[in-house]
Image (cartoon, rainbow, N blue to C red):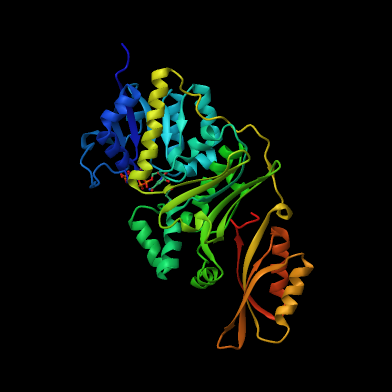
Amino acid sequence: MEKQIVKVGLMGFGTVGTGVVRIISAHQEDLQKQTGLGIEIKKVLVQDAEKARNIRAMENKLTTDPAELLEDAEIDVIVEVIGGISPAKEYILGALERGKHVVTANKDLMALHGAEILNKAQEKGCDVFYEASVAGGIPILRALVEGFSSDRITKMMGIVNGTTNYILTKMSQEGADYAEVLKEAQALGYAEADPTSDVEGFDAARKMAILATLGFRVPMKLEDVDVKGISAVGREDIAYGKQLGYEVKLLGLARRDGEAVEVSVQPTMVPKSHPLASVNGVFNAVYVHGEAVGETMFYGPGAGEMPTATAVVSDLVTVVKNMKMGVNGRGMVAPYKEKILKDDSQKLSKYFLRIVVADKRGVLAKITQMLADKNISLEQVIQQPYNNGSQAEIIMITHLSSKSDMNSVIADMEEMEIITEVKSCYRVEGGDQQ
Ligand code: NAP
Ligand code: HSE
């Protein structure tokens, strides 16, 4: 007899798992109309079955034994929203081994072990979808794989971490204190269990590795991504940025020139006129430039219970539709291009520099000469008194420079007697020539 109901094993009943339960129960009729099959959560794996929950559904379905989901032949799909590497990886591979399809929101796992998981899925003819792993509620992975399948993507810029965007927005708009806003983001369920992953840029780096792999069709690894977080971003950087017409964003950048690619995540000055500069709070956005299509941008909530759960349940709908049509295991195309990484001399950008100098005649001239010796010219400069006027602070925006030239300038500046301190250096992206 043909199957009428697809049974799902839900692993994890925290922020995202709770949203998944709410959406499946509230949209049951719509989901059935779209897929032609009912969707029922049969079992829910948690760590602590006695824990008080803010949702009463599923009370008699909770278990702490993964075998109750993995060994249940009636369960066709495992939805993994536990997070972390282990035991999530073992559970997913175990599910695939038994011919069960998988939906996951786990970017840590997909960025580090995606190739192994996708190979196992292919071997077993199973689906693995992970839309929720990047940019929460924005269907960006499907857009890259399907919507841009005819084009060649040259550049992606992403605000892909909601927690840091929430913090930077509050610092910029309200002058808020970094540590306090981080606590707020944690209370709202945006931050990772260990928020170091958010603020030091690792969460965004995992998402950028996934985006670059799918967008450039190149097998990018996490270690290929240059990462710097926001913990050292000061209110002064934000204020000077604003004065010069920029907002500071933790920006993921994936750029391809010819066949060579670069991927980075770092605090970046974005011109206020660029649409990414207006992406505020927990919102995420991914700007995609394709050779044929030109500029596009995807915008939406990047974290939180319901936005993330919509992406998970949409993946589940795709799995169920595939089951109905008998086409599971053909979803994601494996990266097929050779990975050629740029070296630092090929990574071009404008830079924002803030330095403290001795307030003496001729200092600015010496600094501009030293930059000129490295082929770096200046687009904007401001000078302010510093430390009651005994020193000066110079804030500069350069024209395009290579990362290697900029690194060498900073090393030289740190040795110069007239320079007391190099306070900060950020990439500037999203302007006219970029
Ligand atoms: P969470 O609130 O911490 O929930 C984790 C759930 O997994 C809890 O129900 C916990 O059980 C269960 N769990 C943890 N370890 C387990 C283990 N060893 N065995 C069985 N169950 C275990 O996490 P979340 O925020 O929902 O995140 C889930 C996943 O979604 C992560 O991969 C995260 O990166 C990703 N994600 C989250 C968001 C977001 O906005 N939160 C957005 C996009 C992607 P108990 O309830 O018993 O403690
Ligand atoms: N901690 C992540 C963020 C959750 O803040 O974006 C969504 O992946």
Question: Picture coordinates of residue 402 (x, y %)?
Answer: 71, 58
Task: Pick whichever, 412 or 97, lies toward us.
Answer: 412
Question: Is 239 situated above or below 136?
Answer: below
Classify the position of the N terminus by image quarter: top left
Residue at horizontal 38%, vertical 25%? 320
Question: Is 275 situated above or below 398?
Answer: above
Question: Picture coordinates of residue 202 (x, y %)?
Answer: 52, 52
Question: Is 265 situated above or below 393?
Answer: above
Residue 306 falls in image quadrant: top left
Examine the rendering and report whether any part of residue 176 can be seen: no
Task: Pick whichever, 114 or 60, lies toward us.
Answer: 114
Question: Picture coordinates of residue 383 (x, y %)?
Answer: 61, 79
Residue 214 falls in image quadrant: top right
Side (left or right) of 52 relative to 78: left
Q: For the image shown, how many numbered marks are present on the structure?
A: 0
Classify the position of the C terminus by image quarter: bottom right
Residue at horizontal 28%, vertical 36%? 63
Question: Picture coordinates of residue 93 (x, y %)?
Answer: 47, 31
Question: Is 283 situated above or below 33?
Answer: below
Examine the rendering and report whether any part of residue 388 can be seen: yes
Side (left or right) of 28 relative to 118: left
**Residue located farthest toward the right when viewing the structure as drawn:** 373
Residue at horizontal 69%, vertical 58%? 403
Side (left or right) of 208 relative to 21: right
